[in-house]
Image: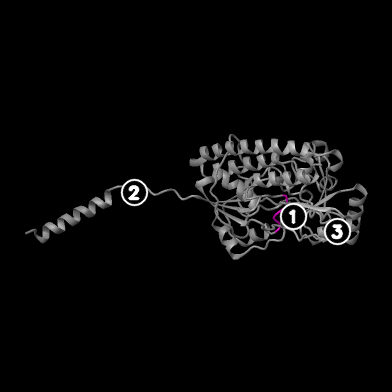
């Protein structure tokens, strides 16, 4: 019979062994990332893949112009390691949220390094070459990419598709980013953007810069996964470049007299500059703007005078005004464009690349002959 002493001795030996044996390895926690709206969320998901846990605050079909942060958004931001924002005063609610939440992670300004269109250029839809703006170092935007104190907005969930990036260095330790300040653009009441058009993602060349900034920030925050992030970036950029070739070919095929696009709000200045189009919108740069009767009358006159055959509604706007303008001018509604938000997974624009291709296809179909 085994003695009680022997049992106790064996138990003691097992306890000692358990205290000295190495514990099983636990998987590293994924990097907690918050993106402010769905287009950024898709880009972040492609780069971060399975190594991040992503929350997108303004989800598919949401309007970041009028977004109001929720308690869930505050909780997500306060827990985040990295916060990815557009900048250029697109997220007008972000500063207020950042002041209310003790966010101590890294903030990535995705538009860092982009030469932004000034409001006047966005309205005129001119080329945006260096001579047009010449601003590489705007106050409050200068050379910041990652900085430490900002915060963020609502709540939308994880993505896990991945893709690429190759070799870009990032934004290390810049702080206190405040987007461009500026007066409200004359003629459009109600929006609070600064001096520049924030819709820079409407150019695929700019999207590559977004992706570079995101990749460098994730690599800095999780250096053990940097090689994966940069490999994902390389694959994604290859897809972006292929999409750019397709879109350029579609837009180049439009007749010279059918290159004016009328849509709800002025979100397509970068698309116009990239592909030689002209976009007109009664609502201005923000969906919060209320066009005046004079703005609407001028738009109706322009459509009639120029023989514009089609107008285009947007997925995030109240389209009754555009539909009224179409009725009064005899123009047809050429389709729905996606400007500031992706569609849901079953819609025509569930990813950034899908969105750009969808918009180009809709424009080509309505204006191409």
Instruction: Say which element carries label 3.
Output: helix
Q: Which residues are magenta?
A: 88-92
Pick the residue in front: 191 or 295. Answer: 295
> Does the stretch in magenta take in 89?
yes
How many angstroms separate mark 3 from mark 2 (CA)?
69 Å
How many angstroms separate mark 1 from mark 3 (CA)?
17 Å
Is the residue 277 above or below the residue 63 in the image? Answer: above
Report which residue position mark 1 lands on. Answer: 314
Q: Is residue 21 left or right of residue 229?
A: left
In the rendered structure, are the residues bearing label 3 and label 2 in contact, judged by CB atoms less than 8 Å apart?
no
Residue sitting at x 61%, y 50%:
41
Q: Residue furthest bottom?
A: 71
Report which residue position mark 3 lands on. Answer: 327
Report which residue position mark 2 lands on. Answer: 24
| x, y percent for residue 292 | 87, 61
How many angstroms separate mark 2 from mark 1 (CA)?
53 Å
Q: Of label 3 and label 2, which has the lower sequence position? A: 2
Is the residue 252 above or below the residue 343 in the image? Answer: above
Instruction: Say which element carries label 1.
Output: strand
């Amino acid at each position: 019979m085994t003695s009680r002493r022997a049992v106790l001795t064996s138990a003691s030996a097992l306890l000692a062994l358990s205290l000295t044996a190495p514990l099983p390895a636990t998987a590293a926690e994924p990097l907690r990332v918050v993106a402010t709206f769905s287009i950024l969320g898709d880009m972040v998901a492609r780069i971060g893949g399975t190594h991040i846990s992503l929350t997108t605050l303004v989800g598919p079909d949401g309007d970041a112009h009028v977004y109001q942060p929720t308690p869930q958004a505050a909780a997500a931001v306060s827990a985040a390691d990295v916060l990815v924002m557009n900048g250029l005063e697109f997220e007008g609610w972000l500063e207020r949220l950042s002041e209310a939440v003790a966010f101590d992670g890294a903030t990535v300004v995705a538009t860092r390094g982009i030469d932004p269109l000034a409001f006047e250029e966005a309205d005129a839809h001119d080329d945006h070459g260096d001579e047009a703006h010449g601003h590489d170092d705007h106050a409050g935007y200068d050379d910041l990419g990652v900085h430490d104190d900002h915060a963020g907005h609502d709540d939308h969930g994880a993505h896990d598709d991945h893709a690429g990036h190759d070799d870009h260095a990032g934004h290390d330790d810049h702080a206190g980013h405040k987007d461009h300040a500026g007066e409200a653009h004359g003629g459009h009441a109600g929006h609070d953007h600064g001096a520049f058009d924030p819709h820079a993602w409407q150019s695929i060349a700019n999207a590559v810069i977004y992706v570079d900034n995101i990749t460098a920030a994730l690599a800095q925050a999780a250096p053990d996964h940097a090689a994966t992030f940069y490999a994902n970036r390389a694959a994604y950029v290859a897809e972006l470049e292929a999409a750019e070739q397709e879109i350029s070919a579609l837009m180049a095929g439009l007749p010279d007299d059918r290159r004016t696009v009328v849509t709800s709000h002025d979100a397509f200045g970068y698309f116009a500059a990239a592909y030689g189009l002209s976009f007109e919108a009664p609502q201005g740069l923000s969906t919060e703007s209320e066009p005046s009767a004079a703005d609407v009358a001028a738009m109706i006159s322009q459509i009639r005078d120029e023989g514009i055959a089609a107008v285009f509604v947007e997925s995030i706007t109240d389209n009754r005004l555009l539909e009224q303008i179409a009725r009064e001018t005899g123009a047809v509604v050429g389709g729905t464009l996606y400007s500031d938000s992706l569609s849901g997974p079953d819609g025509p624009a569930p990813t950034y690349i899908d969105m750009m291709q969808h918009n180009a296809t809709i424009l080509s179909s309505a204006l191409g002959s």
